[in-house]
Image (cartoon, rainbow, N blue to C red):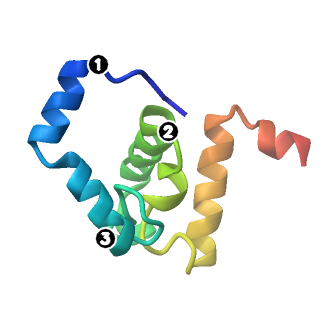
Amino acid sequence: MNQRKVNDAEVAEQKKNGYYEKTFENVYTTFAGFNYDFKEMDTFDATPEEREKFYHHLLIEKGGFEFCLANYQDTYKNEKANLEVCFQMASFLNNDVLISS
């Protein structure tokens, strides 16, 4: 999930910049109460290359729940978009998901 320790300097910077206040605001203003929300763009408005780069960013670089909750806004409303997400995840997992099913 890409977790890491946060050092004292980072904590001080976050406090100074209102990070914690913004985090608590997000509990009430985002879909799942996290510091991120769905991307305000539909899946197929992006090129295949843009989608792959975006999915890689969410799944590999960011980690956590962002792949599920900061994805394109139509991921859960459009069956083809949802399938695109599934296939992209499978490709990042070296097709383990597709091979075992």
* Rendering coords of residue 46 (x, y %): 36, 61
Residue assigned mark 1: 7
Image point 59% across, 60% down: which residue?
84
Tag 2: Cα neighbours inside 10 Å, few (<14), some, or many (≥20)?
Answer: some
The secondary element bearing badge 1 is classed as loop
Label 3 or label 1, whichever comes before in sequence order = 1
Image point 37% across, 64% down: which residue?
37
Q: In the figure, is residue 85 to the left or right of 12?
A: right
Q: In the figure, is residue 40 to the left or right of 4?
A: left
Label 3 or label 2, whichever comes before in sequence order = 3
* Rendering coords of residue 61 (x, y %): 43, 33
Which numbered dot is residue 63?
2
Which numbered disc, 1 or 2, marks the residue closer to the eye? 1
User: Of all residues shown, which one is farthest toward the right?
Assistant: 101
The amino acid marked with disc number 2 is Gly
The amino acid marked with disc number 3 is Glu
